[in-house]
Amino acid sequence: AAFISIQAFPALLDLPQALEVSAVSCGSRHTAVVTRGGELYTWGWGKYGQLGHGNNISCDQARRVEHLVAQGLRVEEVVCGPWTTYVRV
């Protein structure tokens, strides 16, 4: 099982340098950000597929949700629930 660190206090996030974040949402154990370019990045606990990467793998590093890019979808808004992530495109 992957170890996911629990960050109880605010911390700096290391995203690729050219990205500008326009929205952030936090779930029970995962986080998602929307960039000004309409891309979605997620990280954290992924047991129920809530990260959107097509698997149940947890990840400590922010990763772009490639499925949305492949479909040509631009993310407008994200809301994380306890074990879910809702995206408006």
Image (cartoon, grey):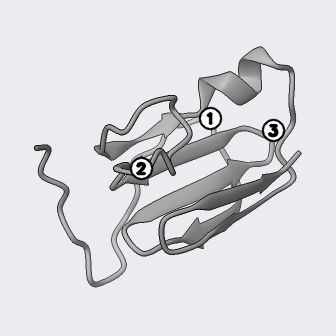
Which residue is identified by label 3?
Answer: 37
Return the residue nearer the eye: 47 or 42: 47
Q: Crowding at label 3, few (<14), some or many (≥20) Cα neighbours within 10 Å?
A: few
Q: Residues within 10 Å of mark 2 (few under 14, many from 20)?
A: many
In what element is the residue under mark 1?
A: loop
User: Picture quarter containing residue 58?
Assistant: top left
Q: Quadrant of residue 33?
A: bottom right
In the rendered structure, are the residues bearing label 3 and label 1 in contact, judged by CB atoms less than 8 Å apart? no
The numbered disc on residue 18 is: 1
Q: CA distance from mark 1 to mark 2?
A: 19 Å
Q: Amino acid at mark 1?
A: Ala
Residue labelled with disc 2:
43
Q: Quadrant of the C terminus?
A: top right
Which residue is depicted at the point 56% across and 57% down?
32
Q: Is residue 59 visible?
A: yes
Mark 3 secondary-structure assignment? loop
Q: Earlier in the sequence, mark 3 or mark 1?
A: 1
The residue that appears at 72% across and 38% down in the rendered structure is 39
